[in-house]
Amino acid sequence: MALFSMRPACPACGGSDVRRSHRKNGEEKGSFAFKVPFRCRDCRTRFFGVNRAKVLGVASLCTVLIGVTGAVRYLEMHLIDLELLGARIRTLFGMY
């Protein structure tokens, strides 16, 4: 079964026949960034589960940003070193 299609088990009855539910109000829509509502078809209990796709997306974005930031920092340090080396060579050979 795919990671994103797995449904959580109902916390009340333990059943696996659950479906996505609608968010009821503005507070639910804005306050639960990584939570999604579900409803158990067996006992009708409404509960929240984790939105795995959103969590994975944010984690992937953070990983990419950290990698890009590290690469930029690495290149900046080496370009500064090359600029200093070039200045030393020009000074050494009287190219100024």
Image: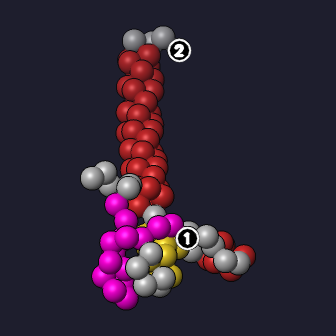
Residue 76: quadrant of the picture: top left
Q: For the residues marked 1 and 2, what is the alpha-carbon distance in whole angstroms? A: 72 Å
Count neighbours of disc 1 (C-alpha within 10 A) and say few if under 14, some if 14 to 19, many if 20 or more.
some
Q: Which mark is residue 96?
A: 2
Is 9 placed above or below 12 here?
Answer: above
Count neighbours of disc 2 (C-alpha within 10 A) and say few if under 14, some if 14 to 19, many if 20 or more.
few
Is 95 placed above or below 39 here?
Answer: above
Residue at (61%, 70%) from the top-left corner?
22
Residue at (41%, 34%) from the top-left corner?
75
Q: Residue 38: horizontal and vertical position, in percent?
A: 49, 73
Of the residues shown, which amino acid type is indicated by label 2? Tyr
Q: Nearer the viewer, residue 17 or 5?
A: 17
- Tags 1 and 2 touching, CB below 8 Å: no
Residue at (43%, 84%) from the top-left corner?
43
Q: Is residue 15 magenta?
A: yes
Decide if residue 61 is on the left or right side of residue 15.
Answer: right
Q: Residue 42: horizontal and vertical position, in percent?
A: 40, 79
Q: Is residue 80 magenta?
A: no
Q: Residue 16: horizontal and vertical position, in percent?
A: 33, 72
Q: Determine whether the residue tagged by mark 2 lies in a helix, strand or loop.
A: loop
Of the residues shown, which amino acid type is indicated by label 1? Ser
Extreme-right residue of the structure:
26
Magenta region, residue range:
6-20
Is 83 placed above or below 90 here?
Answer: below
Extreme-front residue of the structure:
42
Disc 1: which residue = 21
Q: Nearer the viewer, residue 69 or 37?
A: 37
